[in-house]
Image: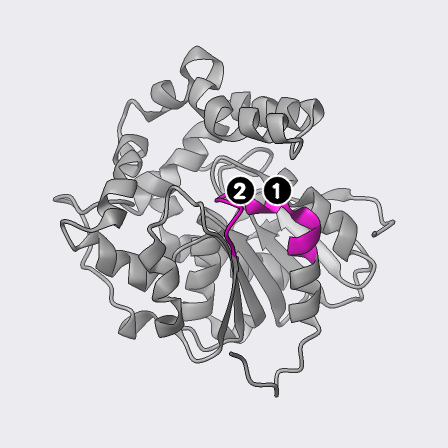
Amino acid sequence: MGTNAIRHVDVQANGLRFHCAEAGDPLSPMILFLHGFPEFWYAWRKQLETLSDNWFCVAPDCRGINLTEKPEDLESFEIGNLVDDVAGIIAAYGREKVILVGHDWGGFMAWEVAIRRPDLIDRLVIINCAHPGIMSELLRQPDSEQVTRSQYMLAFRSEQAEMLVSRDDFAGLRTNILDPGLKAGHLTEDDAAAYLAHWQLPGSLTGGLNYYRANRSGPPSGDDAAPRTVAETQVSVPTMVLWGEGDPYFAPENLERMQEAGPDITVHRYPENDHWIAHQIPDEISARIAQFADRDLTQSTT
């Protein structure tokens, strides 16, 4: 168990001010953690605590989220700019390469960094996030399970999204995230209060929803960009995927096809867990990351 206190700093990257939580010795190898929606840096608090004895751990609030600067223009949330954010944060810390960890939207960002800027990544860890090429192909199969599971994304892209998500004091987020976590003991009342405070922060909810809007996430509609294929979104860096098989948002085929995305992908399945696996088994997640971070890259994977 790490004994290093979590520190809070601001860094300038890609023209924005990013709030970052960090722990550990800045001279140690760096692990950069990217959160998803509707989370913020706090999603990685346990990893910062447990891994910071051996690594310098950094978890930013991503663009538009929580205490990070919130640009108003929707186009600034497009995926290319999000990749530049990650590159800028890595540079701001004076690093050439990092171990990159991402979940949900943070996972999509991490995949895209690996696709577009593999030079920045020593190893990649993905936690319950579909590979973008595989998901794009699935979303263009009209009868695919992924199309059904992604319908909520269309609501998140709508002008009414803020109202839908926040109504009845964030009843939907409470029902899907907070209440199950509290009941199972994965979250504490303090954790729930931290998430509610984040969601209520002016502009933070819109920032998170703008990821869906700017990138036209979900089933195809008239304003979508051209589809992407697995062949054109290959990942060359050593990659580990940790996957709770009860994930309601990603169809099982995303996991079944994962090996198509690159030559060095290791998958660990967790049948008893779901999308929020990092809350449910944080010590296991940290142990897997530590093991993978120490892996001899000359070893073959199966």
Q: Are marks 2 and 1 in contact (CB under 8 Å)?
A: yes
- The residue sitting at the front extreme is 272
Q: Position of residue 83 (x, y in %)?
A: 45, 58
Question: Over which residues does the magenta segment extend?
Answer: 270-286
Going 32% across and 58% down the picture, which residue do you hit? 253
213 relative to 272 in the view: left or right: left
Going 59% across and 28% down the picture, which residue do you hit? 195
Give the answer, above or below, for where 95 lies relative to 179.
below
Give the answer, above or below, for where 229 lies relative to 167.
below
Give the answer, above or below, for where 98 lies relative to 178.
below
Give neighbour class at mark 1: few <14, some 14-19, many 20+ (Cα, 10 Å). some
- The residue sitting at the right extreme is 3
Disc 2 marks a residue whose amino acid type is Trp
Label total for image: 2
5 relative to 141 in the view: left or right: right
Q: Position of residue 94 (x, y in %)?
A: 68, 65
Give neighbour class at mark 2: few <14, some 14-19, many 20+ (Cα, 10 Å). many
Going 56% across and 85% down the picture, which residue do you hit? 300
Looking at the image, can residue 101 be seen? yes
- The residue sitting at the bottom extreme is 298
The residue at which mark 2 appears reads as 276
Task: Label 1: state its secondary structure.
Answer: helix
Q: Position of residue 296 (x, y in %)?
A: 67, 82
- The residue sitting at the top extreme is 168
Q: Position of residue 295 (x, y in %)?
A: 67, 76
The residue at which mark 1 appears reads as 280
In space, the residues marked 2 and 1 are separated at their CA atoms by 7 Å
